[in-house]
Image: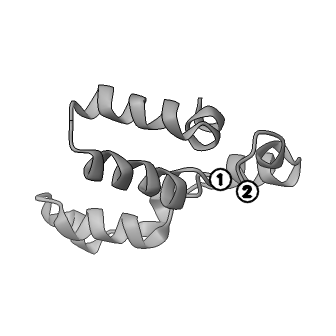
């Protein structure tokens, strides 16, 4: 699915329009570009995003939590090392 989304722009934009229910060509294009820039890569969990989530949490202890305890990129690393992402066009 990801490979088709990033390699078939027309299809990708149709799917973005379908699931967002947005009709603005500008927003759909922006969504597709977002997919290329941020989603269509090996799906490593960025530490910065976890920090943002913890800081925005309403759970008081979340702000004191170590973000590294929520991150495990071992499967993504394994797939990347095996060449999986290259095979499906995600690199």
Residue 52 as seen in the image, left or right of residue 82: left
From this view, report whether residue 26 is shown above or below residue 6.
below
Q: Of callouts 2 and 1, which one flags the residue occurring earlier in the amino acid sequence? A: 1
- What residue do we see at 63% from left, 55% from top? 73
Observer-nearest residue: 59 or 24? 24
| Looking at the image, residue 61 lies above or below residue 76 | below
10 Å crowding of disc 2: few (<14), some (14-19), many (20+): few
Q: Secondary structure at mark 1?
A: loop
Q: Which residue is mark 1?
A: 42
Query: Which image quadrant is residue 63 in?
Result: bottom left
Where is mark 2, residue-wise? Answer: 91
User: Looking at the image, is 29 positioned above or below residue 62?
Assistant: above
Mark in front: 2 vs 1: 2
Residue 12: image tag: none
Query: Is 6 placed left or right of 14 in the picture?
Result: right
**x then y, percent, for residue 41:** 62, 54
C-alpha span from label 2 to label 1: 6 Å
Q: Where residue 59 appears, x then y in whole percent?
A: 14, 58
Residue drawn at the location 53% of the way across and 54% of the way down: 36
Circle 2/circle 1 CB separation < 8 Å: yes
Q: Residues within 10 Å of mark 1 (few under 14, many from 20)?
A: some
Total label count? 2
């Amino acid at each position: 699915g990801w490979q088709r989304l990033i390699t078939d722009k027309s299809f990708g934009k149709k799917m973005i329009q379908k699931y967002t229910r947005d009709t603005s060509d500008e927003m759909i294009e922006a969504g597709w570009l977002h997919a290329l820039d941020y989603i269509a890569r090996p799906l490593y969990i960025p530490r910065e995003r976890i920090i943002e989530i913890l800081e925005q949490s309403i759970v008081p202890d979340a702000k004191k939590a170590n973000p590294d305890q929520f991150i495990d990129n071992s499967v993504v690393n394994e797939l990347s090392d095996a060449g999986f992402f290259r095979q499906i066009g995600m690199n």
